[in-house]
Image (cartoon, rainbow, N blue to C red):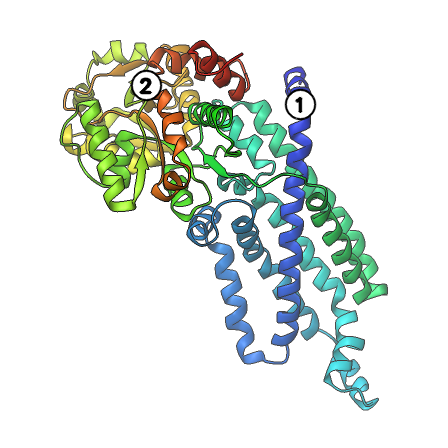
Amino acid sequence: MNEFIQVFEQRQDEFWIKIWEHLQISIISLVIATLIAVPLGLLLTRSERTAEPIIQVAAILQTIPSLAVLAFLIPFFGIGQTPAIIALTAYGLLPILRNTYTGIKEVDNSLLEAATGMGMNSFKRLSKVELPLAMPVIMAGIRTSMVLIVGTTTIAALIGAGGLGDLILLGLDRGGDPNLILLGAIPAALLAIFLDVILRVLEKSSAKNGIRTMGILLAVAVLIATTPLVFNGETENDLVIGAKLNAEPTILINMYEQLIEEETDIEVGLEPNLGKTDLVFSALQEGSIDIYPEFTGTALVSLLDRQPESYEAEQVYQQAKEGMAEEYDMAYLEPMQYNNTYAVATTQEFAEQHDLETIGDLAPIDDQVTAGFTLEFNDRQDGYQGMKELYNLEFGEVKTMDPGLRQGAIENGEVDIIDAYATDSYMVELNLKVLEDPENLFPPYQGAPLMRQETLDQYPEIEEVLNQLGGKITGDQMREMNYQVDYEDRDPAEVAREFLIEEGLLNE
């Protein structure tokens, strides 16, 4: 508990910002869902033939995995709050739509006949009789939708939408840090409970106040959702630099930002922790971000779907650079020195027990091995798929997991081997053994700035600025910086600045 309180005190400014972001995204999504679902539900009561198919469509939308919806929306709407709100609105439609339709259909027929006998037309009957009587049921649907939206909003952090999910992702990236995870998860749950209590009160009052209750709800929701926008004085950036999950890319993008702003008049914004390669590359193609650090081996094998013509680092870079220019019209600047190659790692005890030195040494015991791989590594040709072909391996069990959970899984003995990166800080912390790759499954992975050619054409000065990092940062330096962020909880911006000053690239 003391550690949790300490983490909260260290991050309380960030915490309150994330609370507001989470609330803002959730409320906006709920308002839009309500404005769509309630009128649509009322319309369906007048057209019963189409009611069930449309409600089924809303049900199908709710069954689609949220991450898949977000990934699908990126090419059309980019990253940030817009695609998150669209996805959350789709998730919130079904409870409101179904309850609106059900609430109206369950109004006593004798009351409708009495209203008709009094000379009311269809619209008056709806507004004066049906809607007021159905309001408690409709409000119950809004309550259900609200809880669903607040819980799902956490995953929106993967596309730079902000919210409490940022803290959860940071905790996962730090090896499953329970304090950071709880700092995001507990407030999200409390926020859902708090809003549910408020809506329950409004649901009860709606039996007396009818449609006025919904009007009050929408007015308050709009006020909450728009207040942060009114007081948000952020200026628009000239360039946005994005990064995948992990301390390393976050450190690198802070270096990019500091160098660019020191030596040019360009205003730079950062979007860290955007998820896996495909999500970040989609954001780059769409234009939501302008630059991100990508590894040469990943660009060549995953993005270009090509095998290396050579395993020399410079030749892999040149092949990737030419391929990105030809296929995607992208510029790939000079890579750094360190090679953050994929690695297959295990504990010293497991390696000694089975006399393991190379990946191929796993073949005699592969059916007894439990592997812990990231989803990306498990599906890549320069990952497990290539291991199976090149080394003739088929492990007894493969557990796929978030990158931040691998070290905890191998430390606790839940898996025998993991995929890792050569510069990961936990490789030193846990004293893991890297199995040699004699068949050269893994090409060189040197980090380098990747951007659209149009960005470089618009800001040609950034090439010289960022190329100052070319050939710099050794593997030991990168591991040390990662360690400071992951295990000493230092600010990536401070770590980046210290390195640039030590290298003479920035003035103190």
Label 2 to label 1: alpha-carbon separation: 32 Å
Residue sitting at 15 percent across and 34 percent down? 389
x and y percentages locating residue 309 in the rendered image = 13, 32
Using residue 138 as the reference point, say whether residue 460 is left or right of it. left
Q: Quadrant of the N terminus?
A: top right
Q: Is residue 56 visible?
A: yes
Q: Which corner quadrant of the image does residue 313 belong to?
A: top left
x and y percentages locating residue 435 in the rendered image = 24, 17
Q: Which corner quadrant of the image does residue 202 belong to?
A: bottom right
Element type at mark 1:
helix
The correct choice, above or below, for 407 with respect to 287 in the image is above
Element type at mark 2:
loop
The amino acid pointed to by label 1 is Phe
The correct choice, above or below, for 87 with respect to 457 in the image is below
Using residue 101 as the reference point, say whether residue 389 is left or right of it. left
Residue sitting at 44 percent across and 17 percent down? 482
Which mark is drawn over residue 493? none
**Could you tell me if the residues under marks 2 and 1 are in contact, i.e. CB atoms within 8 Å?**
no
State how many labels appear: 2
x and y percentages locating residue 500 in the rendered image = 45, 15
x and y percentages locating residue 443 in the rendered image = 22, 27
Q: Which residue is mark 2?
A: 422
Residue sitting at 40 percent across and 34 percent down? 292
Binning the other alpha carbons within 10 Å of mark 1 as few (below 14), some (14 to 19) or many (20 upward) gives some
Binning the other alpha carbons within 10 Å of mark 2 as few (below 14), some (14 to 19) or many (20 upward) gives many
Q: Which residue is mark 1?
A: 8
